[in-house]
Amino acid sequence: MKEQHKIPVSKVQRAAKFVGTGAKMGGNYLKYYAKKMVDPDVDRSSLDEANASDVYEALSKLKGSALKAAQMMSMDENVLPKAYAQKFQMAQYNAPPLSYPLVVKTFRRYFDNSPDQIFDSFSQKAVNAASIGQVHQASLKGKTLAVKVQYPGVANSVSSDLKLAKPIAMRLMNIRGRDLDKYMKEVEARLIEETDYKLELQRSVKAAEECGHIEGLRFAQYYPEYSCERIITMDWIAGKHLREWIEGNPGQEERNRIGQAMWDFYDHQIHQLRSVHADPHPGNFIITPKNDLGIIDFGCIKEIPEDFYQDYFQLMEPGILNDGQRFEQLLKDLQFYHPEDSPSEKAYFKSVFTRMVELLAKPFAHEEFDFSDKQYFAAIYSLGDEISNDKQFRRSNAARGSEHGIYINRTYFGLFNLLHMIGAKVKTLHLKKAA
């Protein structure tokens, strides 16, 4: 992928990029409606593909919070049209890398030295580039290291970028602006944390300590003396990225081992620590030669409020759907109902969320769950498609659900999808029962 030699840093430069992208989207709509007048049967796929390409191109050059938000949305293919989801998935691992002179500039700012003066060797080309930063391989005193370098201007542009991205998000997610605000504030808070590499260093070390007892996991050692607000240095975990490992067609026993380690990692964080690695996409996992699961990138951590935790996991309890009064109260407490809903709207959304809970709670209702079950995931995707195309659901462009649900839902959706990719059969209840 072609390297990027500069990033728009000022608010004016970044705003101009958003405005230009909005204009391109407007032009794409005009072309679509012109075609529609000639051929009423033309579908939206060409419009979505054109808009997705234009939006991704702009966000990938801006990097930072806007690109991260695109990555987040791509993890739930039911939130976005398929063209957007597929394009935005590139932000997880394949964003345009930053050129080496800009990396050197960051090192000189914080360490008064270039990478070559600090390390015995340092790869000039990034080995991985994502939304917030990119990774280089280095060596020092016989150790192979991974050095993550944050893109310039990202930390200072989180709030302004999200404000500029709000109109695009409103259009893509079909949520009115006043309701979108609570979600935007939650995303903003997490993204500001994610740009603080000193905080990530602390959380990485803490996670390794608190989860190190879980069988089948591998964590890196971190080096504070070679880390700062915008740079993190850690051990290089040798192995294959998750997608590459899956492409090698591992045996079922290996799949189950990796899947179990992944489930146990998340189960322990959520139910014991009330704090979870909320960025479960394939680029954040390495399979080592010993078939252990290496976990990297602890930038995105969601602290789970106790009241939200209690309400959310009551929805997963067996028999909850048979307790109509309690179920309705949970929907209210978790903000799935909107204050303006009429009785008929409440009845409609209760039926929708009942079907959602029936599906999403299935893995929690069994001692063991087979995530390779294609019928289960087909049912989830089918329900998502049905709801997204339902006129009544789309007419109610109100926010549904607590803002805390953004990252918890994202975590579980990402986890379920990863386990499906792996094709793992997992014991799902044993750790929670021990809590």
Image (cartoon, rainbow, N blue to C red):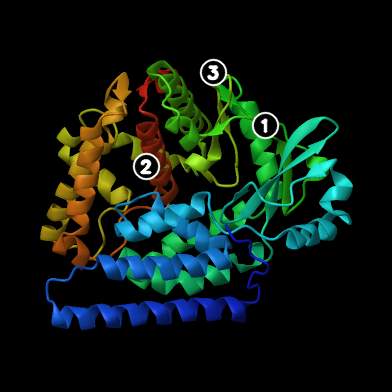
Locate residue 74 relative to residue 359 in the image: left or right: right
Query: Disc 1 or 2, which lies upstream in sequence?
Result: 1
The residue that label 2 is drawn on is: 413
Q: CA distance from mark 3 to mark 2?
A: 23 Å
Instruction: Residue 52: give x, y in percent of width and height.
Output: 38, 65
Q: Secondary structure at mark 1?
A: loop
Alpha-carbon distance for marks 1 and 2? 26 Å
The mark nearer the N terminus, 1 or 3, is 3
Give me the residue at 68% from left, 67% from top.
5
The location of residue 317, given as percent across then percent down, is 28, 30
Disc 1 from disc 3: Cα separation: 15 Å
Q: Position of residue 185 (x, y in %)?
A: 49, 62
**Mark 1 vs mark 2: in front:** 1
Q: Residue 155: x percent and y percent?
A: 65, 62
> Front-most of 147 and 406?
147
The residue where tag 1 is placed is 220
- Considering the image in quadrants, where does the C terminus appear? top left
Residue 78 vertical placement versus 317 (above, below):
below
Residue topped by disc 3? 215
Residue 427 visible in image: no
Q: Which amino acid lies under the numbered mark 2 shown in the image of this protein?
A: Phe
Badge 3 amino acid: Glu
Tell me the amino acid under the disc marked 1. Ala
Whether tag 1 and tag 3 are in contact, CB under 8 A, the answer is no
In the image, taking residue 358 as reference, residue 370 lies left or right, namely: right
